């Protein structure tokens, strides 16, 4: 069982207990009575069985007094990875879900996002959304901000302040007939995006962010493709969310054979690209994704809430396209990745109702999408997503039987044994009260959720 890196840094933390994570070969591994060491740089130094403690302690120079032992019902799991969330829409989460996508954007989203030129307003909302997602166990978030460079920089600063791993995108759009003051010219967007990508934080990175093809001219898309290529940057946008949008893209880009071709043509479909939704992608488009190494962010809450469609995740996975989960606040009414897990399972079962031959997703598969799958979708699998030696220790300490938590102890105490207890926080009763500690890059970010 032992897996070790060459000793290059002293061990700062050692944990003993149960660990659950995913790999490419299996959606769920449960390591019981295991030891995991974290070095001073926040990276996993070793993973071994508890009976190897004497050997490991000699190799890594730690004493038994340094070992933090988990309780009998506690376990560690990788931090949750939200591959698509609009930080700027958090202010109206859970409301304004009475229209389809394009009308929803024009009526609610664009007028709200225009307010983010006000840095005080931005600071208030962005602080709240980073705190909330951390409380919900989101250790990595891929954020959309707005077209305002300074407030987008503020979001990056706030994520860094609270220790969250994040990709933050300044939104780029030069077409907006509904809210005409909420857009840029192609040259303004190019200039501001070049200014935007100059900042650097240890765990927060810029991501090139054309809003979607409908709100970007070919000229702007070309500018953004060049910026991403020249700076080797991540890219995020939306694709094939609803059928009205897909048809509009056909009208706006008649020379392109598909929605996906629009992005590919402008150098925006790369192995660092993550596109939200993809509900109506064709088989040939999925092939373009696979060939490019691009990823899809599955946002089931939003897809249902705005009546956009239902992504067939099984079809995407069989096409060998990278895929993670996203909350898509505020099209999605919850900033919790736990909700995204549940809604992904619900959507899979709804597809089964439509087609009895459909192969539903298992809980274990969706758990992988929310952790390792998300890291792969964001091209961060070498840094996070699982408990592999050399990766950063991004982890959640879970206690299903926390005091005043969502589970009734007399009912569950007798059943939470061995590997079974690992599944219960994702039962319908589970919520963020089960999360006792949050670690990002080895640092305890949220000792108790009330601290934020």
Image (tube, rainbow, N blue to C red):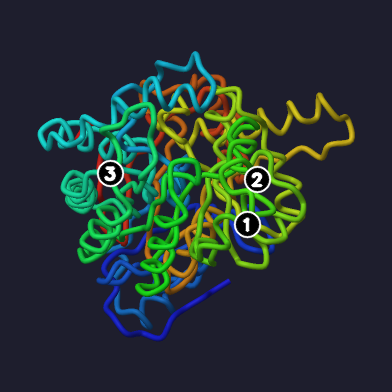
Residue that numbered label 3 is attached to = 147
Q: Which residue is mark 2?
A: 364
Task: Confirm whether residue 400 shows in the render.
Answer: yes
**Residue drawn at point x = 35 percent, y = 69 percent:** 43
Q: Quadrant of the C terminus?
A: top left
Image quadrant assignment for residue 451? top left
From the viewer's perspective, is the residue at label 3 or at label 2 nearer? 3
Q: Earlier in the sequence, mark 3 or mark 1?
A: 3
Label 3: which secondary element: loop
Residue at x 61% of width, y 32% of height: 242
Q: Earlier in the sequence, mark 1 or mark 2?
A: 1
Q: Residue at x 39, y 45 (%)?
A: 397
Q: Nearer the viewer, residue 19 or 173?
A: 173
Give the image location of residue 289, x and y in percent: 64, 59
Categorize mark 1 by other alpha carbons within 10 Å: few (<14), some (14-19), many (20+): some
Is 340 on the left-hand or right-hand side of 165?
Answer: right
The residue where tag 1 is placed is: 261
CA–CA distance between discs 1 and 2? 33 Å
Q: Which mark is residue 237?
A: none
What SS does tag 1 mark? Answer: helix
Q: CA distance from mark 3 to mark 1?
A: 25 Å
Say above or below: 35 vs 257. below
Q: Does the rendering let one see residue 65?
A: no
Residue 85 falls in image quadrant: top left
């Amino acid at each position: 069982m032992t897996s070790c890196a060459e000793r290059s840094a002293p061990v700062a933390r050692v944990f003993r207990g149960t660990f659950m994570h995913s790999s490419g070969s299996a959606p769920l591994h449960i390591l019981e009575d295991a030891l995991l060491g974290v070095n001073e740089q926040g990276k996993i130094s070793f993973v071994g069985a508890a009976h190897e403690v004497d050997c490991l302690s000699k190799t890594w120079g730690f004493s038994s007094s340094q070992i933090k032992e988990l309780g009998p019902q506690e376990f560690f799991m990788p931090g949750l990875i939200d591959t698509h969330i609009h930080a700027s829409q958090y202010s109206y989460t859970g409301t304004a879900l009475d229209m389809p996508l394009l009308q929803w954007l024009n009526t609610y989203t664009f007028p709200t996002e225009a307010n983010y030129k006000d840095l005080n307003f931005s600071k208030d909302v962005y602080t709240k959304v980073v705190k909330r997602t951390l409380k919900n166990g989101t250790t990595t978030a891929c954020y959309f901000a707005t077209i305002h460079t300074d407030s987008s920089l503020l979001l990056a600063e706030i994520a860094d302040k609270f220790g969250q791993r994040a990709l933050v995108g300044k939104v780029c759009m030069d077409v907006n007939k509904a809210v005409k003051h909420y857009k840029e010219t192609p040259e303004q967007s190019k200039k501001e995006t070049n200014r935007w990508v100059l900042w650097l934080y240890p765990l927060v990175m810029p991501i090139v962010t054309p809003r979607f093809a409908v709100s970007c001219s070919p000229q702007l898309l070309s500018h953004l493709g060049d910026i991403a290529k020249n700076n080797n940057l991540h890219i995020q946008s939306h694709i094939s969310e609803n059928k009205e949008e897909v048809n509009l893209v056909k009208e706006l880009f008649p020379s392109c054979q598909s929605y996906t071709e629009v992005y590919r043509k402008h150098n925006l479909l790369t192995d660092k690209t993550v596109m939200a939704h993809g509900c109506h992608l064709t088989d040939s488009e999925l092939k373009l994704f696979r060939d490019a190494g691009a990823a899809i962010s599955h946002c089931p809450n939003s897809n249902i809430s705005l009546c956009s469609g239902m992504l067939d995740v099984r079809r995407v996975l069989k096409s060998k396209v990278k895929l993670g989960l996203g909350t898509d606040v505020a099209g999605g009414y919850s900033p919790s990745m736990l909700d995204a897990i549940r809604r992904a399972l619900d959507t899979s079962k709804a597809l089964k109702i439509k087609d009895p031959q459909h192969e539903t997703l298992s809980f274990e598969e969706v758990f992988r999408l929310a952790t390792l799958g998300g890291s792969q979708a964001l091209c961060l699998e070498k840094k996070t997503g699982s408990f592999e030696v050399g990766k950063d220790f991004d982890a959640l300490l879970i206690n299903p039987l926390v005091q005043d938590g969502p589970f009734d102890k007399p009912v569950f105490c007798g059943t939470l044994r061995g590997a079974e207890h690992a599944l219960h926080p994702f039962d319908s009763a589970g919520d963020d009260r089960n999360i006792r500690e949050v670690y990002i890059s080895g640092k305890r970010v949220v000792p108790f959720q009330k601290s934020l």
